[in-house]
Amino acid sequence: MLSIYPACFFKEDTGYSVVFPDLNWLATCGNSLPDAMRMAVDCLAGYLYTLKQDGDPIPSPSPIEAISVPDIAKELGSDAGDAFVNMVTVDVEEYAKLHFEKSVRKTLTIPTWLNTAAQERHLNFSQVLQEALLAKIKAK
């Protein structure tokens, strides 16, 4: 199912900032307008996917004509300047299959003694690797 939300795009010195006023002021940015649009789609998909996974209510989108760039810029303490509103669309389920839920096969080599010890303990190699990678990522 296609999700469509209005987003405000603000031209910055380094690219564009993007704000979704209907989604708790969810924001992202990009180095160029195409990059900002890609980031907006990814941000929107991730936010809606997380709401669904957590069982939280999904806010209804406002009609584009209800979005006032000057009001939003004022709320953010920003200048409306070259800002504009655009509708951002994404099929969250399809996007999640490609970006959030897809598993990638990895081949690795471990010593035989370690393989034997892990198998004797009925360890799930994929789960152990994921947990170790997450711990390593969070430590940095």
Image: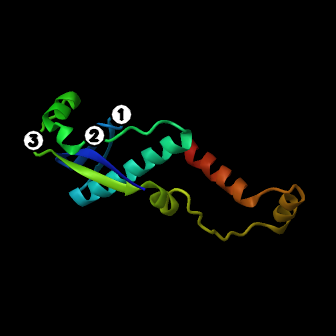
Instruction: Determine contact: label 1, label 2, CB under 8 Å.
Output: no
Residue 103 position in % (x across, y down):
59, 63
- What kind of residue is marked 2? Ser
* Label 2: which secondary element: loop
Query: Residue 105 — which label?
Result: none
Q: Is residue 31 positioned above or below 135 on the image?
A: below
Residue carrying label 2: 62
Q: Earlier in the sequence, mark 1 or mark 2?
A: 1
User: Of discs 3 and 1, which sits in the foreground?
Assistant: 1
Q: Which residue is mark 1?
A: 24
- Residue kind at label 3, given as amino acid type: Gly
**Which residue is under mark 3?**
81
For the residues labelled 3 and 1, the Cα–Cα distance comes to 23 Å
Which is more foreground, mark 3 or mark 2? 2
Residue at coordinates 33% horizontally, 55% vertically from top-left?
A: 89
Residue 138 at x, y percent in the picture = 56, 43
Side of 38 where 105 appears, left or right: right
Residue ID at (48%, 41%): 51
Q: Position of residue 74 (x, y in %)?
A: 16, 29
Residue found farthest to the left:
81
The answer for how far apart the CA atoms under marks 3 and 2 are is 22 Å
Q: Earlier in the sequence, mark 3 or mark 2?
A: 2
> How packed is label 1: few (under 14 Cα within 10 Å), some, or many (20 or more)?
few
- In the foreground, 34 or 138: 34
Q: At 17% from the left edge and 42% from the top edge, which residue is drawn?
A: 65
Element carrying mark 3: loop
Dot 1: what SS?
Answer: loop
Q: Earlier in the sequence, mark 3 or mark 1?
A: 1
